[in-house]
Amino acid sequence: VPPIQLLAISGSIRRNSGNTAVLEALRSRLEHSGKATMTLFGLGSLPLFSVDLEGARLPGEVRAFQDAVRRCDGLVICSPEYNYGMTGVLKNGLDWASRPSLKSPLKGKPALIMSAATASTGGVRAISQIRDTLVACLARVVARPDVVVAKVHEKIIDGKFTDETVLAFAEQAIDDLIAEIRITSGTR
Ligand SMILES: Cc1cc2nc3c(=O)[nH]c(=O)nc-3n(C[C@H](O)[C@H](O)[C@H](O)COP(=O)(O)O)c2cc1C
């Protein structure tokens, strides 16, 4: 059986993003455990969504992103909360991945949502918004206790996210995602 392939999406394109650091730490942890492979897709090169750019004029970056979402076995999203919501960067990416509507690469896709923020609330309000949007796109959001990373800036040392308690909890969430992938694919 080929290994499970996860696509990781950070809701922040900031150079020293804590959310990206959480995903990087999970990626190397999964690599060591052999449970799954994880690839990060940066949303920074996607244009702002417009129906005018669809069809024959679809930009290559958008096609690459849609293909990556379609090909992966499951999505791992980690996003900060901006002004009590998900970031514009992430919403823009999800809108691109949502097309064509109801038949998009997101349809039926198992997806795990996490958030990291500097606040002690860990960006939990972004999670509910992301969940609503993924449900609108018919993705299979993993139902489980939220993975929220509070005070993310205090848990990064030399650019690496290092909090073992958070990483162990996030790995349990990945296990739930893998279980969802196995249930929905029937074979893996
Ligand atoms: C425009 C803006 C709005 C923000 N709003 C919130 C917020 O509503 N709740 C929160 O917990 N943090 C908020 N923050 C702080 C972010 O949690 C913090 O910048 C976080 O580190 C961003 O994630 P990153 O490190 O992955 O870029 C906001 C930051 C910015 C730049």
Image (spheres, helix red, strand yellow):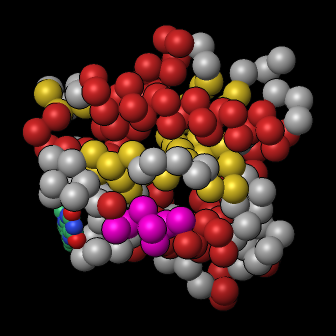
What residue is at 43 percent from the left and 21 percent from the top?
A: 28
- Count of numbered tags: 0
Nearer-the-camera pick, 106 or 50:
106
Q: Is residue 157 above or below residue 147?
A: above
Q: Quadrant of ligand 1?
A: bottom left
| Residue 128 lies in the magenta stretch | yes
Which quarter of the rendering shows the N terminus?
top right
x and y percentages locating residue 67 in the rendered image? 73, 52
User: In this view, which residue lies farthest toward the front?
Assistant: 145
Position of 63 with respect to 108 (left or right) is: left
Q: Given the current orientation, which residue lies at the most extreme left position?
A: 154
Side of 101 where 118 appears, left or right: left
Q: Left or right? Give the position of 75 relative to 118.
A: right
Nearer-the-camera pick, 141 or 105: 141
Vertical placement of residue 126 versus 163, above or below = below
Q: Residue furthest right?
A: 187
Secondary structure mostly seen in magenta is helix
Q: Where in the figure is residue 43, as x and y percent of width and height? A: 47, 57
Name the residue at 49% across, 11% down: 32
The stretch in magenta equals: 125-131
Q: Quadrant of residue 73?
A: top right
Residue 54 in view: yes
Compare residues 106 and 112 and report the one nearer the observer: 112
Is any part of residue 13 visible from this angle? no
Image point (82%, 27%), residue name: 188
x%, y% of residue 98?
Answer: 68, 70
Task: Give the x, y percent position of residue 44.
Answer: 42, 59
